Amino acid sequence: MRRGGGGRLYCPYCYESCVEQEIEFRCAGGPGRGCASEVDTVLRDRIGYAGALPPVFTADGRQSSAACPRCGTVSTARVCSSCHSRLPVLFGKVPSRLIALVGAKQSGKSVFMTVLLHELMHDLGTRLDAAISGADDETLHRFASDYERPLYRESLLLPPTAAAGLRNRVPLVFRFTTAGRQPGWSALRARANGGVPRHTLLSFFDAAGEDLLSQQSVEQNVRYLTAADGVILILDPLQMPGARGLAGSGALLPAPATTDDQPATVLANITDLMLAQEGRRPGEPIRKPLAIVFSKMDSLASELRPTSPLLRPPSRTPHLPEQDSLAVHHEIRQLLERWEGSRIDQIARLHYRTYRYFGVSALGETPTTDNHVSRRGIRPLRIGDPFMWTLAQFGAIPVKRD
């Protein structure tokens, strides 16, 4: 991922920065040719992979290929100089953005991520005329086996993510591509008019909610906030005292929040981290767009007025409907007072140049008491809204303002 015009790149696997020239290569290896495989101690220590691989060598990372100085075999496998993970195709060659997804304890972040990606691969991706694909084989395998299969094929809720450090937890990295176009343009017309495809890297580091409870753990486990161009933060309104009592009958309530894991505290911790790391002038707001997403809104639907924008089906057009998005934003802002969450709005208004509220339901209905999806299946409500808004901030999708 390349940040703006500064030339710095951020690895989507370890989130360390470099310049393109510092990117290294892994020997092509293979039976009967190239260097012998061995354990890559850097990759093992940073990511936890202990299998045998051909060695890494230094070359000019601005080139698409390089010859191994030991055996002469030409390699196109570019790797991060810090963690030795293989980098996505065209990494550093085309401008791209990285979106970070973080979630408070028991907020349903893993379920949100799984349903969003599933929708991007199907209905939402078709609507946006966009393509999403895994940036590596491991991402495709892990998403299918650990996330999509349990939720969609076995109707099982995903287990809570165990607390752990950044090391030995490998992110899921996807490449999302849209055609450069104006509102109403088809992909064909965009290409005919010189539209350049826009690439967004989605690097999902599945941090546990417990990892966001203190400034120290945020620094240790969510370093990728620094590398991200935009942040999607998932909060559970049922962790807020004023909203908890409004939940509909049959709603599964999370354990009561302590002072440390209140949604406002999680937002404050993340904000403190970004204030310290962005290197801005004193008083300058955080420039990264922040989508603040309140999950499980199906549990609070009975308390919403029938005309609430939160109950409307999303637009089927391939652009961001700005007026509808703003209506949801203002509705959530009003609900925050009722939910005893005014501190969240204070933090957002004082510290972020661009932020917006969203209300979603990944499942569409409260799961059963034995942690199964409802028999009616998964029916997400407005799950794509925060992602589309974030893409629109980068110009990756058009905005319709009337």
Image (cartoon, rainbow, N blue to C red):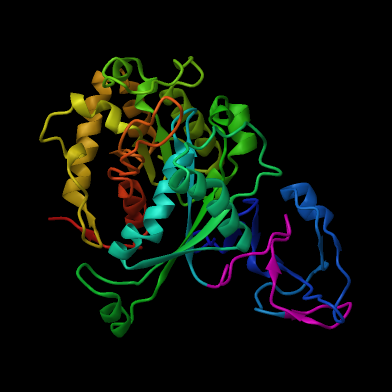
Q: Of residues 195 and 175, which is closer to you in this image? A: 175
Q: Quarter holding the N terminus?
A: bottom right
In this rendering, would 278 be left or right of 394? right
Of residues 284 and 35, the one nearer the viewer is: 35
Residue shown at the point (60%, 63%) measured from the top left = 136
Residue 378 visible at all: yes
- The range drawn in magenta is 66-93
Look at 18% across and 47% down and name the residue there: 324
Q: Which residue shows up at 79% across the image and 48% down it?
A: 45
> Residue 107, image x and y in percent?
44, 31
Q: Quadrant of residue 399?
A: bottom left
169 inside magenta stretch = no
Q: Position of residue 351 (x, y in %)?
A: 39, 34
Q: Please name whichever residue, 286 or 146, is drawn nearer the observer in this view of the structure.
A: 146
Residue 69 colored in magenta in the image: yes
Give me the residue at 41% from left, 47% from top: 115
